[in-house]
Amino acid sequence: MNGLPLNIDIQQILLHLLNFTILFAGLYFILYKPVRKFMDSREEYFKKLDDEAKGLVEESEKAKAEFENRLKAADSEINAKKEAAGKETFAERERIITAANEEAATILKKARDKAQSEHDRIINDAQKEIAQIVNEATEKIVLRSDLDTYDEFLNASKKVEDDE
Amino acid sequence: MSKKRIIVSAIIFAVLIAGLLVGIFLTNNPNQVQEESIQEVMKDAVLHEHVKVSLFGLKDVNPALISAFITTGIILLFSIIVRIFVIPRFKLIPGKFQIILESAVGLFDGTSKTNSPHKYKLLRVYMFVAGTYIAVSTIFELLGVQVMATNGRPITLSAPLADINGAIMLGVTTYLFILFNGLFVSGPRGFFGTLKDFSLPISMSLRLFGALLSGALVTELVYYYKLTSFVIPVFVAIAFTLMHAIIQAYVLTMLLSIFYGEATEEHEKKEKKEKKSKKIKNNNQESLSSEV
């Protein structure tokens, strides 16, 4: 027996400690460490898979965003082209209308000029004809009664003086 | 299982029990006197003054020390078998036994991380080993392993921690583990912070000793008297042993993680305080320089 109460024995405590130390080392190296290593490696494996999946999702989201951007760009390009084509069509239409108007104006002017020149020509011809008729008539009258005409004139003028 | 088979099994069981009871009562010697009084039995269960076991002929020790060695042997043998035959066949999608092993190894992960977030790897190993030792060594009592005492009588080995020496070893070792980790992690502050709780090793040792001894004493008491030694010991022994195995493993590991967390927490606080004081100093210097 030693002097400590409750049969406390330092040597036996140390023997218990030796036992516990052996248990600690053995349990750690034989069981705990390999199981923990496996658990960690599996966690790492699934984490890697998870990271890869996340990466793939991120990539697909990026591709989706890029695709949407491209789609938007294509849409805006189509709209711009549509607008440009509309503008071009409008301009072409305007140009055609303007050209048609101009052509019509030219034709009209030409027609008017032609009508005017025809009119002038007809007037001239008529005037010439009238003048010719007048000349011919005058000649006829003059040649038929030169003296009678003179006398008639004198008589007429004398009558007018008498009336006054 | 069919109904007929259940009835047959129940009849066989009842006949067996009845036969055993008849046998026990017929072999009873009314003139036999108990060699030890209940007081002596109780005292010996607590102090182990008279019942000793020879340790390889070197020294007479308490039976609990032999229990401790056998428990360690059982645990290490189990570990070696698992290491050789089970662990190499571990699969990514675990089977039932693998789940049990992984759950046991990872049982204290959450507690250790919660109570000591920045320094928990060694803590969880210690918690695992201590928890396993307490649980297995307490359940070991149920095996009823018998050895020859130095007085020439066979005795049944009790739980290692039902011996004051075993309980003191675990309580003090746990305390020293907290103390020195506090020193290594937090420096003198952690060390003296733990040293302040000098009652911790005593309380941990006596808690283990008291709890496990109480189970052993109740079982001894129940077995001592003939009337209570039928059926009741089965429930009493199993209930006390299993409950203590789980409760004491849980209590010690919880206390360990909480005190460990406190011992190593100081370091973080100190760092924060230092950072804060540095910030205040820098701010003061800046304000001074701007004023100048």
Image: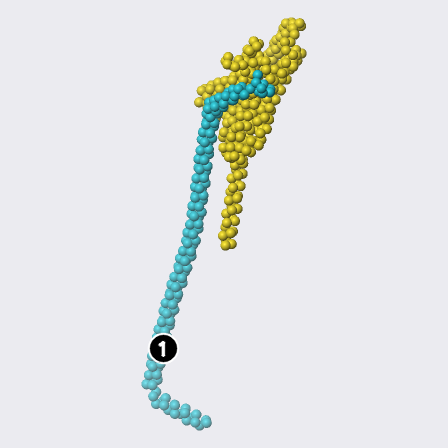
Quarter of the image where the N terminus of chain B is located: top right
Label 1 secondary element = helix
Q: Which colour represents chain A?
A: cyan
Rendered position, B17 above or below A33: above
Q: A94 or B4: which is nearer to us? A: B4
Task: Check the residue under mark 1 and report the chain it is in.
Answer: A
Is residue A74 visible in this depiction of the protein? yes
Look at 43% across and 94% down and name the residue there.
Answer: A161
Q: B204 or B24: which is nearer to us? A: B204
Q: Quadrant of residue B31?
A: top right
Q: B164 or A83: which is nearer to us? A: B164
Is residue B138 visible in this depiction of the protein? no
Look at 53% across and 46% down and name the residue there.
Answer: B280
Question: How would you rate the neighbour count of disc 1 (Cα within 10 Å): few for under 14, some for 14-19, many for 20 or more?
Answer: few
Coloring applied to the structure: by chain
Q: Which colour represents chain B?
A: yellow
Image position, residue A102 (x, y; %):
39, 64
Image position, residue B245 (x, y; %):
58, 22
Look at 51% across and 31% down and name the residue there.
Answer: B181
Image position, residue B289 (x, y; %):
49, 52
Name the amino acid, label 1.
Gln
Q: Residue furthest front?
A: A3
Q: Quadrant of residue B206?
A: top right
The residue labelled by disc 1 is A127
Q: B280 or A88: which is nearer to us? A: B280
Look at 61% across and 10% down and name the residue there.
Answer: B13
Image position, residue A13 (x, y; %):
54, 21
